[in-house]
Amino acid sequence: MEPKDTGGAVPGALHRELLWALASGAAYGISATLVGQPLDTIKTMMQTEQARGVGRATVLETIGRMQASPSLLLRTAYGGGRAVLLGAVLFRSLPFVVYSGTLTSLPWHHTAQLGGVDWRVWVSGMVAGVARGLVGNPF
């Protein structure tokens, strides 16, 4: 739903948009970590076994070794996960927040489109991409 034309940024919408963007970015980061961390652990275990000359284990063999005990499985699959989770939440939230903040702050009285997409969407996406690139690749 497009806000009423106020001739500028939509009053009061920025705060709400930023909170929604932060929540959606956090949900993205949490779900990506919950799924990706165990898969990355399995991949790393397989690579280290191969480097040690033990041979190339399959994914199922590696999971089988991790399942020696339920607590070992969780510790192994999510070991070091707090730092990964924090980083994922912060880095995944940033583009959402910057995009939403930029989009909400741009004037709503222009309706120019580029390729059938509102110009504000293009600009907001580019600003979010630049912000993520700068934070993700420090000098």
Image (cartoon, grey):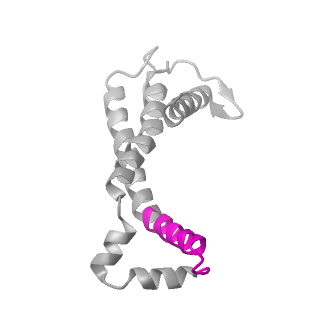
Can I make out residue 104 in this image? Answer: yes
Q: Residue at x 58, y 82 (%)?
A: 58
**Where residue 23 sits: x, y (%)?**
34, 45
- Which of the two residues, 99 or 9, is positioned nearer the viewer here? 99
| Outermost residue to the front | 52
Quarter in which the C terminus is drawn: top right
Residue 45 pos. (x, y %): 50, 71
Residue at coordinates 60% horizontally, 77% vertically from top-left?
53
For image coordinates 36% across by 65% down, the residue present is 78
Report the number of numbered marks.
Answer: 0
**Vertical placement of residue 76 versus 70, above or below:** above
Taking 102 as reference, is 70 left or right?
left
87 falls in the magenta region? no
Residue 2 visible in the current orientation: no
> Which residue is located at x 52 percent, y 84 percent?
60
Q: Is residue 124 above or below residue 57?
A: above
Instruction: Give the residue furthest to the right.
Output: 115
Choose top left, top right, bottom left or bottom right for residue 55.
bottom right
Image: magenta residue range: 37-56
- Is residue 42 located in the magenta-colored stretch of the structure? yes
Q: Residue 74 placed where, x, y %?
A: 32, 72
Q: Nearer the viewer, residue 81 or 1?
A: 81
Residue 126, image quadrant: top right
In the rendered view, does 134 fall on the left or right side of 11? right
Classify the position of the N terminus by image quarter. top left
Residue 111 vertical placement versus 66 (above, below): above
Residue 36: image x %, image y %?
47, 62
Left or right of residue 99: residue 14: left
Most prominent secondary structure in the magenta stretch? helix
* Rendered view: 62 above or below 106: below
Q: Give the residue furthest to the top.
A: 7
